[in-house]
Amino acid sequence: MKIKPVNKKYRPDYPSKNEILKKPSFVMQICRQWNKKVIKASAVGLILSMLLTACEKEEQGSYTIQNEETEKFSFFDKGKKLEKRRKEILESRMLLMPTAIMQPYQLTEEEAWNIIERKAREYGLEFEHNSMTIDNIVLELDNYNNPEKDLMPKEDLKQLKESHSLTLDGYDETKKVGIEYIALPTDLTKKELNLEELIYIYQLSGLLNDALKENHEDKHIKIIIGTTYNKKNVEEILEKQLDEFFTQLKEEKIIE
Amino acid sequence: MNISLHLTNRCNFSCKYCYVNKENPIDMSWDTAKKAIDMAVKMSSTKTGISFFGGEPLLRKDLIKEIVTYCEEIHQKTNIKFYYNMTSNGTLLDEDFLIYARQKRISIALSHDGIREAHDANRVTKNQKVSFDMVDEKCELLLKYNPYASVIMVLNPNTAEYVYKSVVHLFNKGFKYIIMSMNYGAAWDDKALKVLKNQYKKLSKLYYEKSMANEKFFLAPFDYKILSHVDNEKFKSSPCSLGKSHLTITADGSIYPCTQLINDENLLMGHVESGITRTAFYEDKEASKKPCLECAIKDRCNHTCSCINKQASGDIYKISPVLCAHEKMIIFITDALAAKLYKAKNKTFLNKHYNELYPFTSVIEDLLKKKEEKTQ
């Protein structure tokens, strides 16, 4: 047996704490997860302040480093470059997944639809499944000032800038009220993701809601992004979100 | 400042790999213990850690209690906080002491080498009788009073083939903190290291499965090695601090820099009566680590640990090829495992390694879970 050093190029395929703190969206994922669990608000506040301070300090440098690495690899050969880019896209998507690290349970589209239909009925709404498609949806990305935007693969950004169509899970034609539930995407490896998948990954329900309000004033549509935790918890969260929306419509005399 | 107090060199066991010289039985006197604590307090600003060591420290329950009472008095006067831990073969654990340990927050680490074949191969009593049953039956009692108790498993070439089964056994007993510690003093060869490598691979699979099931556990060296990358800045800034932040006091009051170096007169630092007469021990001698200078994992490796070097090569500065081979083996296996868990965005993995408050939040989580179970 001899002492033999490990090649200097060796690097583990998972990030160090310093590297991860440079990606604010990831920090947010972890914090969100705690928030939904049993940890008291004070602890979450403390964690957030600690971690986000670290992000603020180092945010700038990290993206530069990543670009430098990409460049270094780029001239070796095209195949490697493409493979690396594909990996980067996937990793960026995964990192930006707000709920990707809490996988235990998520409602299927069908389970979510059953809850939506039941809740709508409680408020006197007659939802029809997949009956309404809204075309020409354009997101105002200029209003999206999140630092995550810098991490977004160009493909996703390009896709988001295009005009989209969206078929709602439930829609009441008479009262012009609709709900769209967006579940956790199942395949992030695809080159082109659809609008719902992009909305989920980058948590853009706010932008989508704004776009719908802007161009479809006559309709009252709510976009709900699915959460993942345990079954009881996700069902309760969805019911609560629906209650809030329908109660608001009631207060605005849109429904009785 | 942390100190280890060898309360006695007597032991009811005679483990084959034990490095404590038991030829002349000596018990630490109260006077020696008191002087050792006074010395540690003088060297501490806000906290002092005390490890009760032996021989078998539970042979001196009387002295442990005297020491804790004395520390409490010091705390009243100076506000210095004391933390206690001990390593024991477990045979003398009883309900009274466990209740006392819980009240005084003494962490207990049990020495247990796993399944019968592994344990009995090296851990025998003073009368050369096997000890598996004696120790194994104490696990439940220990965990009843200290659910977070850790267990230390020593890895030896003659029992390397049982490592995986032993870890599973200890998990099944209910331990959540398992520390595998290499006996570098043993005659490791390529064949034995290969056996160990296969065992580590199996454990890596187990670690992955447990993490994916969101089970909470700590398995060293796997978790240490992941941390050595995740928190590398912290890890590399704290190499061996021989004699700087930790001292070992033998039963007769001699001061050494580390528990495993107490047999080397050349490393004697002083005596509790006369104080520390020699301080500068370990220097970061780059030249002595020449083969490691170009190594990609040098900041994650234990080659700066003096007692491992001493154990493995007989010299605190001389790095052993066994250490080099083992460190590479465990780091590569661990890195592959961690990368897989990271890609899976595993909640337990991310919390354990990236969330500094996890130990705290995890305990809260456990307490609330327990409360919930009770109400149901």
Image (spheres, coloured by chain):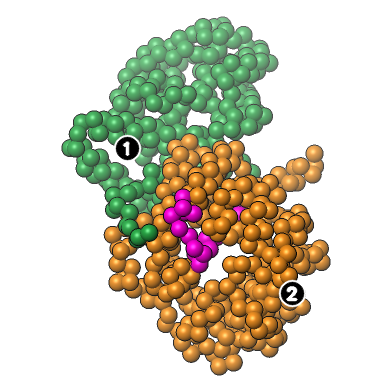
Chain colours: A green, B orange
Regarding mark 1 in the picture, which secondary structure is present there? helix
Is residue B250 shown left or right of residue B332?
right
Q: Residues within 10 Å of mark 1 (few under 14, many from 20)?
A: few
Of residues A21 and B188, which is closer to you in this image?
B188
What residue is shown with label 2?
Answer: B59
Look at discs 2 and 1 and give the one toward the viewer. 2
Q: In x, y percent, where is residue B270?
A: 52, 88
Instruction: Name the residue rendered at 74%, 46% in the picture.
Output: B370
Q: Quadrant of residue B16?
A: bottom right
- Magenta range is B177-194
Q: Can residue B47 be spotted in the picture?
A: no
Instruction: Name the residue rendered at 40%, 19% in the picture.
Output: A194
Instruction: Name the residue rendered at 46%, 68% in the picture.
Output: B312
Residue farthest to the bottom? B274
Amino acid type at circle 1 is Asp
Q: Specify the subunit that label 2 lies on.
A: B
Q: In x, y percent, where is residue A16?
A: 40, 50
Is residue B222 shown left or right of residue B21?
left
**Picture quarter with the C terminus of chain B:** top right
Is B235 placed above or below A80 here? below
Q: Can residue B100 be spotted in the picture?
A: yes
> In the rendered structure, does residue B192 fall within the stretch colored magenta?
yes
> In the rendered structure, does residue A27 fall within the stretch colored magenta?
no
Alpha carbon separation for disc pair 2 and 1: 63 Å
Is A253 placed above or below A26 here? above
Is B120 placed above or below B200 here? below
Q: Specify the subunit that label 1 lies on.
A: A
Instruction: Name the residue rendered at 46%, 27% in the picture.
Output: A200
What residue is shown with label 1?
Answer: A150
Regarding mark 2 in the picture, which secondary structure is present there? helix
